[in-house]
Structures are given as structure tokens and as C-alpha cells.
């Protein structure tokens, strides 16, 4: 978010009060677009986030399946 704000994009996790929406998935494509335009390739944070998210979901599923065994 800090990267997008420094590039003049309007980003915020808070809409009203302390309510946080899951906007990270909304800002990732914007981050990809901005970094592609500036550097000619996708920024590393884009792939790092998706890799960690997929791994977290995989370990969650493995943990749930191991409880059943």
C-alpha cells in the first residue's frame, strides 16, 4: 500500500471507522499494473504474497486433514 500511495494512487484499508475490508486482493492487480508500467516486470511483492497465501492455505488443509486421521 505504501508503494501505491507513493505513486499517487488512492488506497486505504479503512472505509469507515475501524472496519477493515479484505482489499488486499483488490490492490494486488493495481500493484502489478503499476510495477509493470514502471519497471517492465511484475514486482516481487506480488508473487511473494500469492506464494505465502497458497502455502498458508495448503498447510491449513494439511492440518485439518491430519486432525481427522
Image: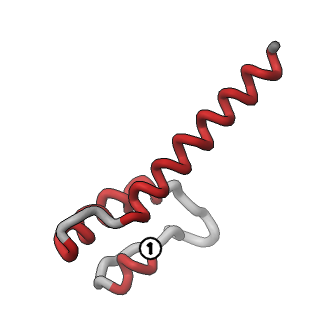
Residue occupying the point 23% across, 64% down:
41
Whether residue 23 is situated above or below residue 68 in the rendered picture: below
Q: At which x and y percent is residue 36?
A: 21, 66
Identify the secondary structure beneath mark 1: loop
The image shows a total of numbered marks equal to 1
Q: At which x and y percent is residue 62?
A: 69, 27
Q: 40 and 17: which one is in front? A: 40
Q: How is the image coloured?
A: secondary structure
Relative placement, left or right, of 56 versus 12 is: right
Q: 19 and 9: which one is in front? A: 9
Q: 24 and 12: which one is in front? A: 24
Relative placement, left or right, of 37 versus 30 is: left
Image quadrant holding the C terminus, namely top right
**Which residue is labeled 1 in the image?**
1
Residue placed furthest toward the top = 69
| Quadrant in the rendering for residue 16 | bottom right
Q: At which x and y percent is residue 48?
A: 47, 57
Residue occupying the point 20% across, 76% down:
38
Q: At which x and y percent is residue 3?
A: 39, 79
Residue occupying the point 46% across, 49% down:
50
Image quadrant holding the N terminus, namely bottom left
Whether residue 55 is situated above or below residue 36 in the rendered picture: above
The crowding category of the residue bearing disc 1, from other C-alpha atoms within 10 Å (few below 14, some 14 to 19, many at least 20), is some
Whether residue 52 is situated above or below residue 30 in the rendered picture: above
Residue occupying the point 75% across, 30% down:
63
Amino acid at each position: 500500500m505504501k508503494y501505491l500511495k507513493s505513486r499517487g494512487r488512492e488506497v486505504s484499508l479503512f472505509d469507515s471507522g475501524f472496519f477493515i475490508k479484505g482489499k488486499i486482493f483488490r490492490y494486488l492487480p493495481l500493484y502489478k499494473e503499476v510495477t509493470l508500467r514502471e519497471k517492465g516486470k511484475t514486482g516481487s511483492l506480488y508473487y511473494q504474497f500469492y506464494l505465502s497465501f497458497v502455502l498458508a492455505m495448503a498447510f491449513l488443509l494439511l492440518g485439518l486433514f491430519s486432525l481427522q486421521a
